[in-house]
Image: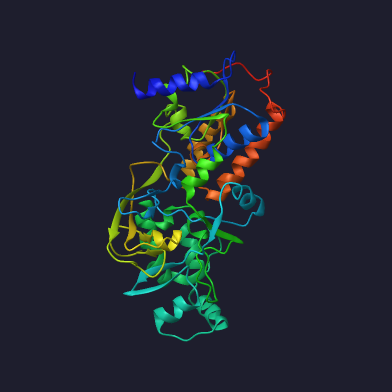
Amino acid sequence: MDKISQDLERAAAATAPGSAAFDYLIVGAGFAGSVLAERLANELGKRVLIVDKRPHIGGNAYDRYDDHGVLIHPYGPHIFHTNSEDIFDYLSKFTQWRPYQHRVLASVDGQLVPMPINLDTINKLYGLNLTSFEVEKFFESVAEKKDEIKTSEDVVVNKVGRELYNKFFRGYTRKQWGLDPSELDASVTARVPTRTNRDDRYFADKFQAMPLHGYTRMFEKMLAHPNIKIMVNTDYREIVDVIPFRHMIYTGPVDAFFDLKYGKLPYRSLRFEHVNVPREQFQAVGTVNYPNDYGYTRISEFKHITGQEHASTSVVYEYPCAEGDPYYPVPRPENAELYRKYEAEAENTPNVTFVGRLATYKYYNMDQVVGQALSTFRKLEAAHGVSRRTDAALAAPVAA
């Protein structure tokens, strides 16, 4: 008997005696799927089967120890930050935290300067000694004011002018997206602040911390409930007609769910090159951006992020690409219009709930995905009953 057949047998056997179904089939074991699985099992006593086509849980936030014993993030650095006390408290049920404030330098004109642009960035780049008040006047003097902010280019030149735009943003954006900032929605660069003080933290959120023992350990605790069964290395289409269930929660690409009915939604992907370096530290901060040089956009060193002590260090080079796993929805009007067709299909698909980045074609930070999942749980709770038992009134099993 092959591995998938064995997993199918175990999953089928896991249903309660005399029962015909899992209450929920959850497609995807990342943040969205795992939070919903945990809530449905712990709060409502529902039986949940969660499947993922990758060989692990945790989605892109999955972490592991490499061959040298260094804890790495195979899918690039994942830095947790949030302003929501509720979200932080919820995740704190499954992990202790290590305080960590991420810092980024940018390689510009042969120097490493703070990013986002702040007072020290300007003083170091131009050999000046400006005060916070004076640097605000500096930005005003170089800014190209726009009557209407439509594109990512507009956002930046309106704040800091053309020269700083070219030094820090244009090249990075062209590498990351394969498009000029003038072709992208304003939201892409609007996420990056410009500061007049010396604050060199990349994020300014109230809560900034990393899971003390890693993300994977946190996901394992989140899913450690007898009502939750997990199948990895499994495409949900392999089991959807074999294992009965009452409701599906889908966190994968929405266009793939509908067999690319209206065409493929565009994404940017990443190729990761992981390297171990036989010394304790490779660079001064967690991430160094390379907006203008090389084929990669940034290098991240994991020991800064995790706090691990080790004789060697591991880094990752990120190369943006057009093909590969879907990471970033491309924010252009024509893509939003295409997604609206799939959104309408999703809204009219009974017994399936679409949640998460890929299912809603929108880039979310990790905390935002958790927030969306918790909100979705409350809706499912209202729709499917609040008792800690299987609700016999749920819809009949679906074959999606």
Total of numbered circles in the picture? 0
Q: Residue at x 51, y 43 (%)?
A: 219
**Seen in the image, is 250 located left or right of residue 170?**
right
Q: Residue at x 46, y 53 (%)?
A: 78
Snapshot colouring: rainbow
Please state which of residues 131 and 140 is positioned toward the viewer in this rendering: 131
Which image quarter holds the N terminus?
A: top left
Where residue 314 appears, as percent x and y from the top left, is 33, 58
Where residue 216 appears, as percent x and y from the top left, is 47, 45
Please state which of residues 63 and 69 is positioned toward the viewer in this rendering: 69
**Seen in the image, is 91 located left or right of residue 170?**
right
Q: Is residue 93 above or below residue 3?
A: below
Dividing the picture into quadrants, the one containing residue 348 is top right
Where residue 334 appears, as percent x and y from the top left, is 46, 42
Q: Is residue 200 above or below residue 43?
A: below
Where residue 283 appears, as percent x and y from the top left, is 35, 68
Please state which of residues 371 and 17 is positioned toward the viewer in this rendering: 17
Q: Is residue 83 visible?
A: yes
Q: Is residue 295 visible?
A: no
Please state which of residues 278 and 140 is positioned toward the viewer in this rendering: 278
Q: Which residue is the extreme one toward the bottom? A: 129
Q: Is residue 114 above or below residue 303?
A: below
Dividing the picture into quadrants, the one containing residue 70 is bottom left
**Seen in the image, is 272 located left or right of residue 230?**
left
